[in-house]
């Protein structure tokens, strides 16, 4: 078992299949007969060097330019390089992600495509040749894809079902730019950087979550998860939501017993874990010591893998609470004989790295564990290129208190969810924001009503889980993990967000998920596989005491940021509200126990660090 102390001055699995690359993509498409700006695309591509440190490429077709940064995980040869073009068919593609079933698709596609690489990128290209716009229905994995189809004079964009891989868009008259990160779009210039007041309302309501398609900037949007977008030569946009599981008891599953569900979920989760071993490089696990990541280790061991590289992080214990959960991660590491590494971080080191962590955020993210993931990713990237993570299990299997509180209140599902989840109600926005930024209507509640009351959810808990998984989760925690890991060219894979597992869980009776304080079906599985103390531990959040109880260098950074000339010129927050929080920096917390002062500071610091003055 290894242990690191951070200062700022593993054997590969024997898998036959391999998966291509996780990386950064960028491009510009013109719809006005002008040539696409190759210099802007090159600037966007170069700005994402951390996402793809193993190579880069640019392709130009006149009206379209594609850029790519490569992180080699599958087909490490140049045959898998991007952008990938098929001149005979008039196709060019850039792709960020991993197609886990590409080996299974390859034999069927070989009849219409002569493969020259073992990469999953080429499988995506062949799938589009074979199935046209239905190609996305055949893909199992995480992906953001852009295809230029010159013969049909159209562009096709697709994002994976759970939004694991991002795709940011900056539309403008006569053109569209896209990139894997919002800061990359800023690097290309000519982006409307005014703040979106509706997005700001969401940010302050839901601990920094801004659901797609919005971002905090008016000139940048996100392609929503499970969306296929086709844009023709005139710039006309047609969207199709290609996947939405039923949150209801369906088909033969409606009569399943508890044991039937346990067996099916065990098998589905095992399949999800095995799928995410597809790689030509070693795969590790981010082991927090919680139920979710511990189950991943147990399932890997169940399939015969030994000496699994595992990684945990801990901080100094202070006024903000306990700083690590090593007692649990150590127990799991001992049980399964993993090659375990513990990263210990001192408060002064975390304070020093906070600006860099903010730089790595594709959007401002106020949850306290974002810098923790940044530091952990930096250390893990020295050992492996690919890790599995337990993110998403709480949202899919009803692990949080707000899932149960939201349906236990007499006010109704919308009021119940808002009171359990929201940081502030609409009336409180007037205490926080200067009048020019206030919305007359409660735009956040309107979105909750639209999503929670939509047909297709059989029970209130089904509706809450659907909202969480498909609207809120892609922008926290999914965005958090992707941003921080890719800052160091580390690919994170999330088995609990496997499309088949999520669909199965959506049809699972909600009472099986909400048992035992949440995640009852997972806890039942864990009791058969894990140390008892991991199952019966109190539910907690990633402990980062120095960001929960602000003092010392961190409080100095927060104070400097919120009282700076840039902050005062922006005129976003009411000065009396900021002064009140600064006088009592540890007096107000969100329902998920985040420090409200830190939330404001992250937004202002992110805007300043990315040169946004409006």
Image (cartoon, helix red, strand yellow):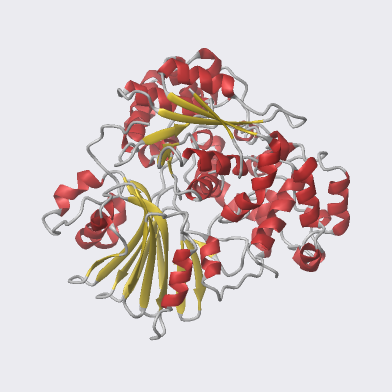
In the image, farthest residue toward the front:
9
- Residue placed most toward the observer, 284 or 569: 284
Pick whichever, 84 or 596, lies toward us. 84
Q: Residue at x 61, y 52 (%)?
A: 356
Whether 514 is drawn above or below 544: the answer is above
Q: Quadrant of residue 495?
A: top left
Q: Taking 106 as reference, is 71 left or right? A: right
Q: Where residue 156 sits in the image (x, y, percent)? A: 35, 66
Please tell me which residue is depicted at 29% across the width and 59% down the height of the picture: 81
Would residue 218 be found to the left or right of residue 490 on screen?
Answer: right
Asked if residue 591 can be seen in this view, the reply is: no
Which picture quadrant has residue 494? top left
User: In the rendered view, does 273 fall on the left or right side of 14?
Assistant: right
Report how many numbered discs are placed on residues in the image.
Answer: 0
Residue at 52 percent of width and 44 percent of height? 481
Nearest the camera: 378 or 471? 378
Tell me if residue 118 comes above or below residue 254 in the rendering.
below
């Amino acid at each position: 078992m290894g242990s690191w102390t951070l200062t700022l001055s593993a054997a590969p699995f024997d898998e036959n299949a391999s998966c291509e690359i996780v990386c950064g993509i960028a491009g510009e498409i013109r719809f006005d007969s002008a040539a696409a700006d190759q210099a802007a695309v090159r600037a966007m591509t170069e700005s994402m060097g951390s996402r793809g440190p193993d190579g880069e490429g640019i392709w130009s077709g006149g009206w379209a330019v594609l850029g790519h940064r490569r992180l080699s995980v599958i087909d490490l040869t140049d045959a898998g390089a991007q952008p990938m073009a098929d001149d005979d068919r008039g196709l060019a593609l850039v792709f960020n992600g991993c197609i886990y079933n590409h080996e299974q698709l390859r034999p069927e596609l070989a009849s219409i495509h002569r493969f020259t690489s073992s990469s999953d990128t080429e499988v995506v290209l062949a799938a589009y040749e074979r199935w046209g716009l239905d190609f996305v229905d055949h893909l199992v994995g995480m992906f953001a894809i852009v295809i230029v189809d010159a013969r049909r004079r159209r562009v096709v964009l697709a994002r994976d079902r759970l939004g694991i891989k991002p795709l940011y868009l900056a539309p403008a008259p006569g053109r569209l730019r896209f990139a894997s990160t919002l800061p990359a779009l800023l690097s290309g210039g000519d982006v409307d950087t005014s703040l979106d007041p509706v997005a700001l309302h969401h940010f302050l309501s839901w601990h920094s979550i801004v659901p797609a398609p919005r971002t905090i900037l008016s000139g940048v949007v996100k392609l929503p998860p499970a969306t296929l977008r086709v844009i023709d030569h005139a710039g006309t946009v047609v969207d199709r939501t290609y996947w939405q599981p039923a949150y209801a008891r369906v088909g033969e599953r409606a009569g399943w017993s508890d044991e039937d569900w346990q067996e099916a979920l065990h098998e589905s989760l095992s399949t999800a874990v095995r799928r995410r071993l597809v790689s030509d490089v070693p795969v590790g696990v981010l082991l927090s010591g919680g139920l979710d990541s511990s189950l991943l280790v147990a399932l890997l061991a169940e399939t015969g893998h030994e000496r699994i590289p595992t990684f945990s992080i801990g901080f100094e214990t202070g006024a903000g609470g306990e700083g690590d959960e090593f007692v649990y991660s150590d127990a799991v590491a001992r049980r399964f004989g993993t090659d375990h590494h513990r990263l210990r971080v001192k408060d002064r080191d975390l304070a020093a790295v906070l600006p860099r962590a903010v730089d790595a955020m594709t959007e401002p993210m106020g949850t306290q564990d974002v810098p923790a993931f940044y530091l952990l990713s930096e250390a893990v990237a020295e050992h492996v290129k690919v890790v599995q993570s337990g993110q998403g299990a709480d949202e899919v299997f009803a692990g949080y208190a707000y899932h149960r509180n939201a349906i236990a209140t007499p006010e109704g599902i919308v009021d119940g969810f808002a009171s359990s989840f929201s940081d502030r109600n609409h009336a409180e926005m007037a205490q926080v924001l200067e009048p020019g930024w206030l919305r007359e209507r409660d735009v956040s509640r309107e979105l909750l009503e639209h999503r929670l009351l939509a047909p297709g959810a059989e029970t209130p808990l089904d509706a809450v889980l659907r909202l969480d998984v498909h609207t809120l989760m892609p922008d926290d925690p999914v965005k958090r993990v992707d941003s921080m890991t890719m800052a160091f060219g580390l690919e994170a894979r999330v088995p609990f967000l496997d499309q088949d597992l999520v669909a199965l869980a959506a049809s699972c009776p909600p009472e099986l998920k909400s048992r035992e304080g949440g995640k009852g079906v997972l806890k039942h599985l864990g009791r058969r596989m894990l140390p008892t103390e991991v199952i019966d531990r109190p539910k907690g959040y990633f402990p980062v005491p120095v960001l929960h109880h602000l003092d010392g260098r961190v409080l100095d950074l927060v104070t400097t940021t919120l009282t700076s000339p840039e902050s005062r010129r922006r005129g976003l927050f009411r000065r009396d509200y900021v002064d009140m929080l600064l006088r009592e920096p540890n007096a107000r917390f969100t329902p998920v126990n985040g420090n409200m002062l830190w939330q404001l500071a992250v937004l202002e610091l992110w805007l300043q660090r990315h040169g946004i003055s409006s």
